[in-house]
Amino acid sequence: MQVEFLSNDKKVLNVITLGKTGNPKISKKSEIVLQTYHFDIKQLQFIADNGKGITLKEGFIQPKLTTNNCGVCPLRFGGCYTFKFHQALGHLSKLKAIIRRNKLMEFSTLTDEIKSKVLYMLSLTSQKYIRFGTYGCPTHLPIDLVKDICNEAKTWTGYTHEWNDPNKAEYLNYFMASSHSNDSTFASEIANKYGFRTFEINSKNGVYCPHYTHGVKCSDCGLCSGTLGKGKTNVYTHEH
């Protein structure tokens, strides 16, 4: 089950899917979860025009095609975990399937009907867990939709590099600020001053991710859920 709708002046296609994930960190193999994906409309057009590949140089993830959905994230130029072969291939397949079903590339913006369907999909998950931003930045979801989902969810996770945008301030309630110990622009200390809790790699700022200490799945943990979620401090890890 899946819904699709446009946001960001129709520059971003948001896709919310119900199903299993092959990522063992996120949930158990048999678990049904909700996940959100955020694609630049330029990526869809690239594939619709017979563009091929999953490389940064020529494929659908090349930086000039991800200005809208990935925004200020420095990892869109290289290093993002979603660029790993199987993840990138899965996202490419998802876009191709969307194009096959919607050859005219006509998508609506968020409607009450779509919002109701998303909440219904959440009710069908194994643990009322949603993973925001499996690909792309989840702040492209309207904040009212995020609020409604999190009010119904048992646990959720979400991360954003857009934490220094004053127009995205309210997302601090639900998402972690993605920060970098080696980049002063995205330092966790600055994000904390903005009110965000942070998720940082190669750091010792906060609580070490329980997945690597106790094998806890994200769907059971829920620490990476902004200021209104389960956690009260920053989270860090040495892997991603």
Image (spheres, rainbow, N blue to C red):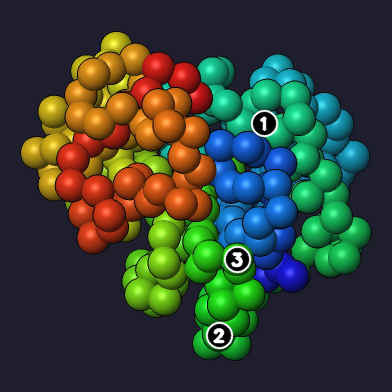
Amino acid type assigned to the residue bearing label 1 in the image: Ile
Residue occupying image coordinates x 78% and y 63%:
105
Q: Is residue 10 above or below residue 51?
A: below
The residue singled out by tag 1 in the image is 61
Amino acid type assigned to the residue bearing label 3 in the image: Ser
Amino acid type assigned to the residue bearing label 2 in the image: Ser
The residue singled out by tag 2 in the image is 116
**Disc 2 or 1, which lies upstream in sequence?**
1
For the residues labelled 2 and 1, the Cα–Cα distance comes to 31 Å
Q: Residues within 10 Å of mark 3 (few under 14, many from 20)?
A: some
Q: Is residue 165 above or below residue 110?
A: above
- Say if residue 9 shows up in the picture: no
**Disc 1 or 3, which lies upstream in sequence?**
1
Residue occupying image coordinates x 86% and y 31%:
52
Where residue 201 appears, x then y in whole percent?
Answer: 36, 21
Q: Is residue 174 above or below residue 150?
A: above
**Numbered disc in front, either 1 or 3:** 3
